[in-house]
Amino acid sequence: VWYHKPAINEELLQSLPNLKVVASAGVGIDHLDLKLLSSYGVKVSNTPFIVSTDTADMGMALMLASSRRLVEGHEMAVSPDTEYFPVDWLGVEVSGATLGILGMGKIGYKVAERAKAFEMKILYHNRNQRKKEEENAVGAVYCKKIDDLLQQSDFVLLAVTLTPQTHKLIGKRELELMKPTATLINISRGLIVDQDALVEALQNKVIKAAALDVTYPEPLPRDHPLLKLKNVIITPHIGSATKKTRWVMMEEMAESIEAGLAGLPVPREVL
Amino acid sequence: TVAGRVAAAMAMSVFVTRRIPAEGLRVLSQASGCRVQQWDSEEPVPRAELLAGVAGAHGLLCLLSDRIDREVLDAAGPGLKVISTLSVGFDHLALDEIKKRGIRVGYTPDVLTDATAELSVALLLSACRRLPEAAQQVRSGGWTTWKPLWMCGYGLSDSTVGIIGLGRIGQAVARRLKPFGVRRFLYTGSGPKPESAAEFGAEFVPLARLAEESDFVVVTCALTPATQGMCNKDFFARMKKTSVFVNTSRGAVVNQEDLYEALAQGQIAAAGLDVTTPEPLPTDHPLLSLQNCGECARAGSPSSGTGGT
C-alpha cells in the first residue's frame, strides 16, 4: 500500500480471502484499521526506520526555507517585475533561535540532532520523557506541558503520530499560545492541525508563518485559502522523497510480503 | 556662536550609500560630532549621486553594490578617513588605491558568518529536495496525488560534501551539515588549513578532485583574481550528474553560461544561488528559465539581527 490507497475496508477484505499481509509504505499507519485487519488474520508491516532521515531533513529544509523566505526570494529573483533587491529584505535567523519539537520519536530526535548544529535552543514534548543521555546529546529540554513549549518557541515542529489523541492537537487555543513571531512546521499529518484555525491564525497574524509538508486533504482543493497566503510554504508530502529511500522502502515492503506469504515472522510487523 | 561654528566645522560628515536598517543609522546619527548624509533609497545609488555625495566626506558607509574606485576616492577628496562596507567581501573596493591614501577600511567579517552559512545550507536543502518546484506544483494544481517516485530529490545521508573556501563561512557550513549524516568532507583553496579542517576530518584536495567526488559542492570563497570564473565548463563537466551546486560567495566565481549549460544538459542535478552577475539577473537570462536552478535574491546576509550591526 503506497500512501493510503487502496482504502482497506471490510468490502475489500471480504473480496480478498487469501490476503495474508499488507505492507504499507512509510511509518504512519493512521490510514489502516488495525483491529479490522487483525480480525481477518492479516498481518501488517510498515517501513519505520528508513524514512526518518529524509523526513528530518525535510523538516529542517522547511524551517530554513520559511525563515529565510527562500520560496518568496526565488520568485522575486526570477520575476520579470523585479528591478532591484532591497537591502532591508530581511529574514529571521534559525541559528540561536528556540525550536519546540512536538513528538520526539525517531524523526523528532533526528531533527533535534540537526538543529543543534545551528545552535538552536531545543525544547520538546513527548508522551514519555527521553533518557538523560539522549536529552544531553542534543541539548533538549523536556516540557511536560505543551503550553510551555508553545509559549517559548520561535519554531514549533510537529513530528507526532496521528492518533485519536493527537487529532487537532494544534487548534485555536494552541496557536494563540504561540508567539506572534513564531512559525509552525508540520511534517507529520495534516489532521494534527485544525486547519481552519490555522488559516485564521495566519490571516490575523496570530502566528507569523507556516511550512507544511502535509495537509488535509492532500492535495488541497484549488481554492483553499492556504494556497493563497504569502506566509505559507506547502510541499506535496515529499518528506521521504529521495530515490534511495523510496528504493529501500520498496525492498522492505517486498521482503515483508515474502515473509508473510511464506508463513515466516514478518519484518517490521505492526502489532 | 563661535562654539557652535567650531563644532560645526569639526563635525565629521558621513555619506551612507543606501537606506539601511534603522538601528545602524541611529548609531551614526547619534554619535557626537557626526553628520550623516544618506542616499535614502532601496535602490543602489546612481554613480553621479555617489560622486556628489562623497564630496568632502570624512567617512563612507557603502554596500557591496557600490564600486569604490579611484574616481570615487578623488571625488571624496583628501578628507576621507574611513570606509565601512556592509559585507565581508571587499572585491568592490580598490584596496591598493585606498591604502595608498591612508584610508582605513572596516568590514563585517564575523557578524554575518552564521546567517550566511545558514542560508547556504538552506539553499542546499532547497535545491536537493526541490522545494521551489514542489511548492509551485502545489499551487498550480500539478500535484494530483501522491506517487512514489514523483518529486524525488537527493539525501545528504552518506554523502560527500565539497567546500570551496574553508574560511569562517565554509566552516560554519560544514558544522551545520555534519549531523545530516555527511560521510566525508572535502575542501579546496589556496592552501590546506589543518586546524580548521580537523573538526570535520576534511581532506584538502585539488579543485578537480573536489568536483569529481562531491555529491554537494558549496562555494564560500572570496572573489579574487585566482577564483574569478573558477567554476567553469571543465569544473561542471567533472561533477556528478546527481550533484548539487550552491554558491553564496560572489557571482563572478562562477562562469554563468557554463553553469547554465551544465544544468540544461543534466551534467549536474541542481543549483542554488544566492549570488549572480549581475544582481538581479536580467529577466531574460536563461538561468531563470531552469526548474533546477534556485535563486533567492541575495537573502544571504541580512537577517533582522545582523543588518543593524
Image (cartoon, helix red, strand yellow):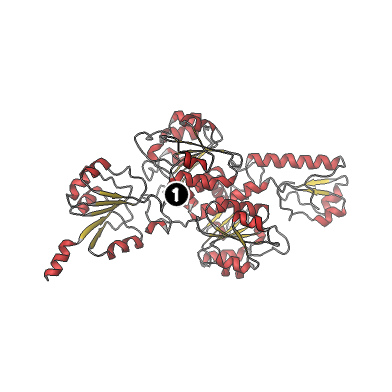
Numbered disc 1: what chain? B
**B174 displayed left or right of B73:** right
Q: Is residue B291 visible to the viewer in this orientation of the structure?
A: no
The quarter of the picture where the C terminus of chain B appears is bottom left
SS assignment at label 1: helix
Amino acid under disc 1: Thr
Look at 68% across and 59% down and name the residue there.
A130
The quarter holding residue A158 reads bottom right
Q: Which residue is mark 1?
A: B116
- x, y percent for residue B292: 51, 40
Look at 53% across and 42% down and name the residue there.
B200
Pick the front one: B208 or A40:
B208
**B30 displayed left or right of A259:** left
Q: Residue furthest front?
A: B195
- x, y percent for residue B303: 43, 56
- x, y percent for residue A232: 53, 57
Pick the front one: B128 or A36:
B128
The quarter holding residue B70 reads top left
Q: Is residue A77 visible to the viewer in this orientation of the structure?
A: yes
The quarter of the picture where the N terminus of chain B appears is bottom left
Dot 1: few (<14), some (14–19), or many (≥20) neighbours within 10 Å?
Answer: many
- x, y percent for residue B151: 60, 43
The quarter holding residue B275 reads top left
Pick the front one: A188 or B173:
B173
Above or below for A257 versus B107:
above
Numbered marks: total: 1
